[in-house]
Amino acid sequence: MTEEEHLNILVIMGSPRKGNTFQACEVLRDKMQEYQAVDFEYLWLKDAALQPCRGCLSCFSKGEEKCPLHDDALAIQDKLMGADAVLFASPVYGMNVTGLMKIFVDRFSYFFHRPRFFDKKAFLLTTTGFMGHKDVLKYMEMFTGIWGFDVAGRAAIITEGDNHEILKKKSDAILEKAAKKFSSSLTSNKRKRPGLMNVIIFHGQKGAMSQVIDESPYDYHYWKEKGWLSPGTHYFTDVSVNPVYVMIGMIVEKIVTRKMRKI
């Protein structure tokens, strides 16, 4: 395989140090090389100039270019858009992602309103000494899914315990399985069918966005130009959607639309 055929995996590294999370990513990379050539490009959030979001809502109403914070956000957005896939990695801090990762998520809040990564796969990785990994993976799956990523896999590595040899064997097995699954997903252009919650989120947002032309014109026009406000549109992408999910989603859309009109 030639250099040009290497897939570029952007790693959003939420850890402030080269510890367990970084080592797990390196093991994952090495195991993925057995299936296909990949390059891991690390974006260390600790080194990125990302200021905390001020909650001014300018990105919603006027667009991300109008944000009063002048930092690395738009350059990072370009990296996200240019990657073949993205690996989100964070250790468990205080039963959640690290503060670095949370600032990253908050700084790109407009992705929740204007999702765009539907052509990209994401993989989620967390490490913990004992617990909290389920909450971290759930949170990362939530925001990456709403942003448009097709979540291709997830892995949690537990690093503390009495028998480090057993833990290492378990971790290697988890990462071996994850590498195979992630690599396989990268060779396929197929997306998973949206689940019920995915469809509900779409229709709920559709109901809201159809009513914000004055308050958030940038959001409104983004949705309109994508065709997502059209009556027959039931999801962000052209995939098969369960008819029952569509019915439930349309009910949610009507409820949200009514509430937004009252507001």
Image: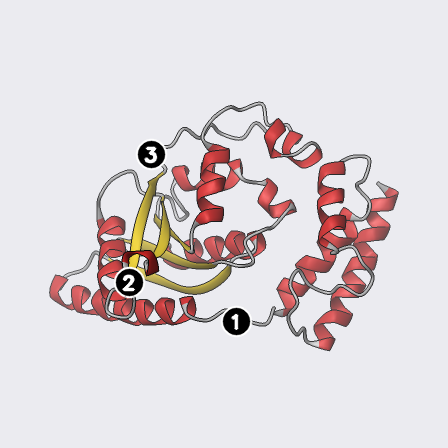
Check contact, mark 3 vs mark 2: CB within 8 A: no
| The one of 33 and 261 positioned closer to us in this rendering | 33
Q: Residues within 10 Å of mark 2 (few under 14, many from 20)?
A: some
Mark 3 or mark 2, which has the lower sequence index?
2
Q: Quadrant of the N terminus?
A: bottom left
Q: Which residue is mark 3?
A: 46
Residue 207 is situated, as x and y percent measured from the top left of the image, at 78, 53
Q: Marks 1 and 2, Cα distance to the nearest angstrom?
A: 20 Å
- Looking at the image, which residue is at 75% across and 54% down? 206
- Looking at the image, which residue is at 47% across and 62% down? 151
Numbered disc 2: secondary structure: loop
Give residue 37's mark: 2
Using residue 249 as the reference point, say whether residue 138 is left or right of it.
left
Q: Which residue is outermost to the bottom?
A: 243
Q: Residues within 10 Å of mark 3 (few under 14, many from 20)?
A: some
Taking 240 as reference, is 3 above or below it?
above
Amino acid carrying mark 2 in the image: Ala
Amino acid carrying mark 3 in the image: Lys
| The one of 87 and 84 positioned closer to us in this rendering | 84
Q: Residues within 10 Å of mark 1 (few under 14, many from 20)?
A: few
Q: Marks 1 and 3, Cα distance to the nearest angstrom?
A: 34 Å
Residue 89 is situated, as x and y percent measured from the top left of the image, at 36, 51
Residue 91 is situated, as x and y percent measured from the top left of the image, at 32, 49
Mark 1 or mark 2, which has the lower sequence index?
2
Check contact, mark 1 vs mark 3: CB within 8 A: no
- Looking at the image, which residue is at 56% across and 58% down? 118
Residue 172 is situated, as x and y percent measured from the top left of the image, at 21, 67
Check contact, mark 1 vs mark 2: CB within 8 A: no
Numbered disc 3: secondary structure: loop
Q: Quadrant of the C terminus?
A: top right
Q: Which residue is mark 1?
A: 190
Amino acid carrying mark 1 in the image: Lys
